[in-house]
Amino acid sequence: MVRIKTNVYSHKRKKRVLKEAKGQFGDRSKRYKEAIKSLIGSRQYAYFDRKKKKSEYRSLWIIRLNAACRESGITYSRFVSGLKAANITLDRKVLADLAVTQPEVFAQIVEKAKILKPKLATKKTAKKE
C-alpha cells in the first residue's frame, strides 16, 4: 500500500492557527505550539465573556435607571416596586433607553410608579395584621 504524506494538510492547519493567533504577544503569534495554547485560552475567555456581557449590560441599565429615578425624587428599588404595583411590564433595557432618549415619557412612568407605591411592610404592621 502506498504511504500518504500529510504535509500539505499539516502545513494548512499550522498556517490557519498562526493566522488566527496574529496580533498576540511574542511567541504566541509565531510558534505553533504556543499559538495553540493561546487560542485555547482566548476562546475560553470569548465564551465566558459572551455570557458576562449580558449581566454587565443589565447592571449598566440599572445604574442609568437609578440615576434617572433619583433626579425624579425616588429611589430605584421603590421605582421598581411601584412599577410592579402599577402592572407596568417594561424591562430595564427599555426603561433605561426611555430615561436617556425621552426623559418626559420616563417622568410620566415615574409619576405612575410614585402614585401606586406599595406600603412597605414593617415588623409592627406585619404583627398587627
Image: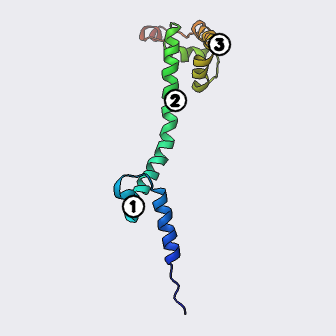
Q: Quadrant of residue 87?
A: top right
Q: Is residue 116 above or below residue 94?
A: above
Q: Could you classify mark 1 by the number of other residues whose Cα lies within 10 Å: few (under 14), some (14-19), or many (20 or more)?
A: some
Q: Could you classify mark 2 by the number of other residues whose Cα lies within 10 Å: few (under 14), some (14-19), or many (20 or more)?
A: some
Q: Could you classify mark 3 by the number of other residues whose Cα lies within 10 Å: few (under 14), some (14-19), or many (20 or more)?
A: few
In the displayed image of the protein, which residue is found farthest to the bottom?
1
Q: Residue at x 52, y 19 (%)?
A: 65
Q: Which residue is mark 2?
A: 58
Q: Secondary structure at mark 1?
A: loop
Compare marks 1 and 2 and give the one earlier in the sequence: 1
Q: Position of residue 55 (x, y in %)?
A: 49, 34
Q: How is the image coloured?
A: rainbow
What's the CA distance linking mark 3 and mark 2?
21 Å
| Depth check, front residue: 123 or 82 | 82
Q: Position of residue 31 (x, y in %)?
A: 38, 63
| Depth check, front residue: 62 or 118 | 62
Which amino acid type is shown beneath numbered disc 3? Val
Q: Which residue is mark 1?
A: 30
Viewer can see residue 54: yes
Q: Quadrant of residue 82?
A: top right
Q: Which residue is mark 3?
A: 105
Viewer can see residue 77: no
Q: Residue at x 52, y 73 (%)?
A: 9
Q: Residue at x 51, y 43 (%)?
A: 50
Q: Secondary structure at mark 3?
A: helix
Compare marks 3 and 2 and give the one earlier in the sequence: 2
